[in-house]
Amino acid sequence: MPQPDAMQEGLSVLIPVYNHKCLETVRRIKHVCDGTPGLAYEILVADDGSTDADALECNAAIGEMANCKLYKRQQNSGSAATRNFLAEQGAYPWLLFLDCDVDIPDDGFVGKYLQNRVDGAVVSGGVKTCRESKRLKSNLRYVYEHNAEASYTAAMRSKRPYKSFRSVNFLMQKDLFLSVRFNEGMKRFEDVFFGKVLQERGIHIRHIDNPVEMGYFEDNAAYLKKIETDLLMLDLFREELSGFSTMLDCEKALRAPLLQSSIKLWHKLFGRLERRVLVGGSPNLAVFNLYRIGFFISNQ
């Protein structure tokens, strides 16, 4: 691994992974880093106790690549702890955090981040969905993310800079990050809470249009199960996420007893039918929204 001079600028690319083949993502970001003139860099990948044998076998090749290192953690500790661990290992003063299942659509991706970096601030590049295909039109997560894509531009994110923060793709100085860190006690919503902490600390977020591309979308049943788990966890973090959760804001607006009772009755009568629609081949976003609010209010 590179050993930079103490005064040398450089970049540590940090990628947590769990039960996912991320070799191609690493190859792609390595290609982009290699093509960035004068860049000293490293790519650190931490496997968070994966159990998928195919993913483990595929990702093992990462450790053999120049400027790359693969850490294997024995127990699953969550993405917050894994990102904090990677930040501690980083050799360079700038940290670029990426999710393991994204693509880098632009060869100038790293250069644009370096041109827009700001001392004492976070730089968030954003995310976009891959080009539409007939296959993805039946995928609930793709339909949801693609429909929301207009709100993912830098201009839109800048209107709500802290509430728009996502950990999928951002740049930050190592010392600054380690003074904040992700909350390891939160197994979900740690990036939402991170945005809240940045606001409380007065740390500026600079939103730019430098998105990574989402190309992996779990099947409808798996995604809906993930959403249900998130909603159950959300109730546990009400205090921490107050003012930063759209669902909590929605529930607050619907707090009148008659409304609450009506939503619970609706979910009891139609929740299973809504769920069948959502896991089927023609997911509907209106049904998705009804199901989520009904599930959340009915499971408190």
Image (cartoon, rainbow, N blue to C red):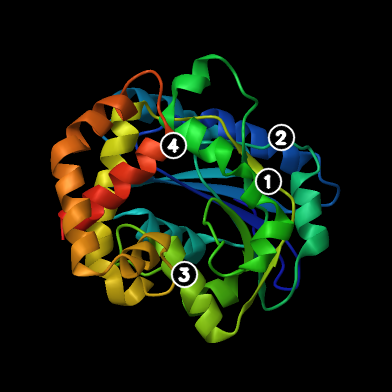
- Residue topped by disc 1: 211
Please tell me whether mark 4 sits on a helix, a strand or a loop.
helix
- Classify mark 2: helix, strand or loop: loop
> Is there a contact, CB below 8 Å, between mark 1 and mark 4?
no
Q: Mark 2 points at which residue?
A: 105
Q: Which amino acid does label 1 sit on?
A: Pro
Please give left or right for residue 114 compared with residue 264 in the image: right
Which disc number belongs to residue 25? none
- Which residue is rendered at x = 51% and y = 70% of the image? 195
Q: How many numbered discs, if any?
A: 4
Q: Residue 194 carries which label?
A: 3
Label drawn at residue 285? 4
Q: How crowded is mark 2: few (under 14 residues within 10 Å), some or many (20 or more)?
A: some
| N-term-proximal mark, 2 vs 1 | 2
Residue at x 29%, y 29% (from the top left corner): 221
Q: Which of marks 1 and 4 is in front?
A: 4
Front residue (pair 229, 137): 137
Image height check: is 107 above or below 168? above
Nearer the viewer's eye, disc 4 or disc 2?
4
> Which badge, 1 or 3, is on the more N-terminal residue?
3
Q: How far apart are marks 1 and 4 (CA)?
A: 24 Å
Amino acid type of the residue tagged 3 in the rendering = Phe
Image: 102 above or below 276: below
